[in-house]
Image (spheres, rainbow, N blue to C red):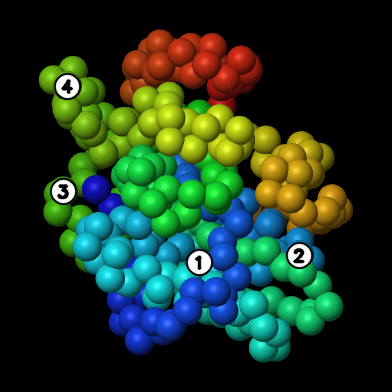
Amino acid sequence: MTPTSPLLKSFKDNAYLGCMDKQQYLPPRYLIIGERKCATSSLYRYLLAHPQVLPCKLKEPQFFSQKPQYIAEHILDYFALFPTQKYEGDLWFNWPELNKAGILYHEPVCVKRNPAINYITGEASANVFHEVAPELIYQYLPQVKLIVLFRNPVARAYSHHRMYVRFQEEGRDLGFRVNSFAEDMELEIAKINRGERSEYLSPGMYLNNLLKWEKVYGQQNILVLFTEQLLHPSSAQKVMNQVSRFIGINHYDFGNYLNKKFNKAPNSSIPKKIKKQLINFYATPNLALAKHLGRQLNWEDF
């Protein structure tokens, strides 16, 4: 379950955007589909620093989280969230962001546009990978390239829980109560043992969902990255080179911009006892993911 996003509310409030012809807008070349709390915001902002990339009007539209009928009726509004094919000047946005204390604020963003450049565009909605059926998006965007980020699932679950603690403190209606991390993890493990889907732990069982997306889009159209690769500028530059090749844009030196981290809460430590329990919980799913990808996960130390 994802609480109603202020961005999604903004989308609904601006449904008058509806265009008569989606061809007047740049079609999204790529979607960053998640996973949540895996640095999707940072990756998206890095991409927007590339001189060939323009943003969506909403930082995280979450459009495909809606019911199929709503999507069918408003799909032209979705395409209208992207820049026009025709040059219409620089683009200005107010995007939600977290400051160093973890407090939400709105950051003014200006993206320069050069009429001589052939741009691409895309968006990032981090809930999509876990919550949206791949067939639904394929119905409207069969040619789009998909990018997914995986993070050490224990660290991801802890960050996800901290986000909901913050939401609860802000007075948002989550539909459930957020307790201490240890209490909620015990409840989550019990849910999974009963064969139920859980809020924090299920999203970190990445392979289950990856197979669904690969079945619809094919492995060649999905780029799997690890959050940990973005922690240091040297490895982050390699990631951005990989992303650039994947979506068909030129190599670009992002330089010191890769030192920036977006939508990042203050550091905090996972209680040791529950950390060890969760490492054991994820051992088998992680092994299966590594085997499927043919890559080492390097999630032992964090």
Query: Which label's residue is closer to the chain start, 3 or 4?
Result: 3
Q: Nearer the N terminus, badge 4 or badge 1?
A: 1
Element class at badge 4: loop
**Amino acid type, residue under disc 4 in the picture:** Gly
Of the two numbered discs 2 and 1 in the rendering, the one whose residue sits closer to the viewer: 2
Residue 195 marker: 4
Mark found first going from the N terminus, 2 or 1: 2
Residue 216 visible in image: yes
Q: Residues within 10 Å of mark 3 (few under 14, many from 20)?
A: few
Sequence-wise first label, 2 or 4? 2
Label 2 – label 3 distance at C-alpha: 44 Å
Which residue is disc 1 drawn over? 59
Circle 4 crowding by C-alpha within 10 Å: few under 14, some 14–19, many from 20: few
Q: Position of residue 300 (x, y in %)?
A: 56, 17
Which amino acid is tagged 2?
Gln
Between label 2 and label 4, give the one nearer the viewer. Answer: 2
In the image, residue 154 sits, relative to residue 293, either above or below, namely below
Nearest the eye: 155 or 93: 93
| Relative side of 263 to 156, left or right | right
The mark lying in front, picked from 3 and 4, is: 4
Dot 1, how many residues are within 10 Å of its Cα: few (below 14), some (14-19), or many (20+)? many
Lower position in the chain sequence, tag 1 or tag 3: 1
Q: Real-space Cα distance between discs 4 and 1?
A: 34 Å
Residue type of the residue flagged with mark 1: Lys
Which residue is tagged 2? 52
For mark 3, what is the residue?
177
Query: In 3D space, how far apart are the residues under numbered discs 3 and 4 (Cα atoms)?
Result: 21 Å
